[in-house]
Amino acid sequence: MEPIVRQSVSDLVVANLKELLTSGQFAVGDRVPTEKELCETLGVSRTSVRESLRMIKAMGLIDIIPGKGSFVRKTNETNDNEYLDWFAKKGIAYSDFMEVRMMLEPWATRQAIQRATDTEIETLEDIFHDFETAYHKKDRVGLVQCDEQFHEQIFSMCKNPLLASINDKIKEYFTEFRVKVFNEESGISNAIEPHRLILNAFVTRNLDAGELAMKAHITEIMRDIAAALQSNS
C-alpha cells in the first residue's frame, strides 16, 4: 500500500483498504487494524477511514461491531454465491444486469402497487425518509443502504418469492456499483427525485406512473454507473 494524500472519501481510499484486506495477511474473523493505525498507514484522516470502512462493510468484506472494532468477513471479493460465481465465469457485465433490471423492475413496481398493503407502503415511505436524511448528510454509505432497501421493499411487495430471490442476486452483485455511483456528486444529486416519484405512485396507487418512473430511474442509473466507471478508468 502507498500513503494517500487526499483526505476525502474516494475510490482510492476504498481500493487501498480492499488491498489490505485481500493481501493474505488476514483470515476470516481477524480484527482489522484500528482507525488510528489505518490513518497512519494510509495517510488519511480518521473521518475518511471511518467512512471508507463503512463502504467496505457495505461491500460485505467486513463486519463492524460497535465498541469492539472491525472484523474480516471475507478475504476476497469473490461472492460465495454459486449463481454469482457462474455470472462471473460467463463474463456477464453490469450492463447485462441493468438490462435485466430494466425488464424486471418496472413490471415489479406495477405488481407491487397493486398488491401492497397500506402498511407496506408506509414502510417504503420510512425508507425514503431515511434516504432523504442520508442525502442531506452526504452519507454515501447510508445512501447505498437505503437505495438497496427501497428496491428490496418493492420486490417484497410483489408477493412473489422467486422474484424477490432474483433481486437478491442482483443486489449482491450491484453493491459495489452503488458505492461507485454515490461517490460521484452527480450520483448523489440524481438520487432523490426518482425515488420520490416512485413513492408517490405507490401512495396514489397509480400503476402507469409507477412503471414509467421506474423505467426513467433505471435509465438514469445506467448513465450514472457509466459516468462513475468512466471517471475511475
Image (cartoon, rainbow, N blue to C red):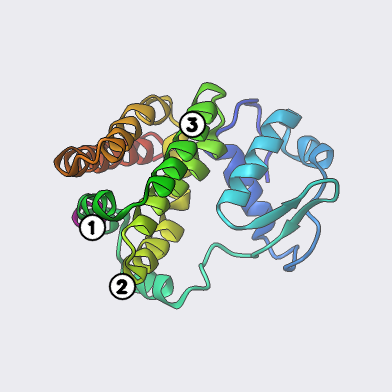
The magenta stretch is: 100-105
For numbered disc 2, what is the local secondary structure?
loop
For numbered disc 1, what is the local secondary structure?
helix
Q: Which residue is mark 3?
A: 129
What secondary structure prevails in the magenta region?
helix
Labelled pair 1, 3 in contact (Cβ < 8 Å): no
- The amino acid at mark 3 is His
Label 1 packing within 10 angstroms: few (<14), some (14-19), many (20+): some
Residue 38, above or below 100: above
Tell me which residue sits at (34%, 30%) in the image. 196
- The amino acid at mark 2 is Lys
User: Is 60 placed left or right of 179 in the picture?
Assistant: right
Q: Which residue is mark 2?
A: 90
**Image x and y of residue 221, in percent:** 30, 40
**Residue at the front extreme?**
118
For marks 1 and 3, the one nearer the N-term is: 1
For numbered disc 3, what is the local secondary structure?
helix
Q: Quadrant of the C terminus?
A: top left
User: Is 147 placed left or right of 198 in the picture?
Assistant: right
**Image x and y of residue 176, in percent:** 47, 50
**Image x and y of residue 211, in percent:** 19, 44
Q: Nearer the viewer, mark 3 or mark 2?
A: 3
Labelled pair 3, 2 in contact (Cβ < 8 Å): no
Q: Which residue is mark 1?
A: 104
Tell whether position 82 is magenta: no
Residue 44 is tagged as none
For marks 1 and 2, the one nearer the N-term is: 2
User: Is 160 placed left or right of 184 in the picture?
Assistant: left
- The amino acid at mark 1 is Leu
Indicate the quadrant where residue 219 lies: top left
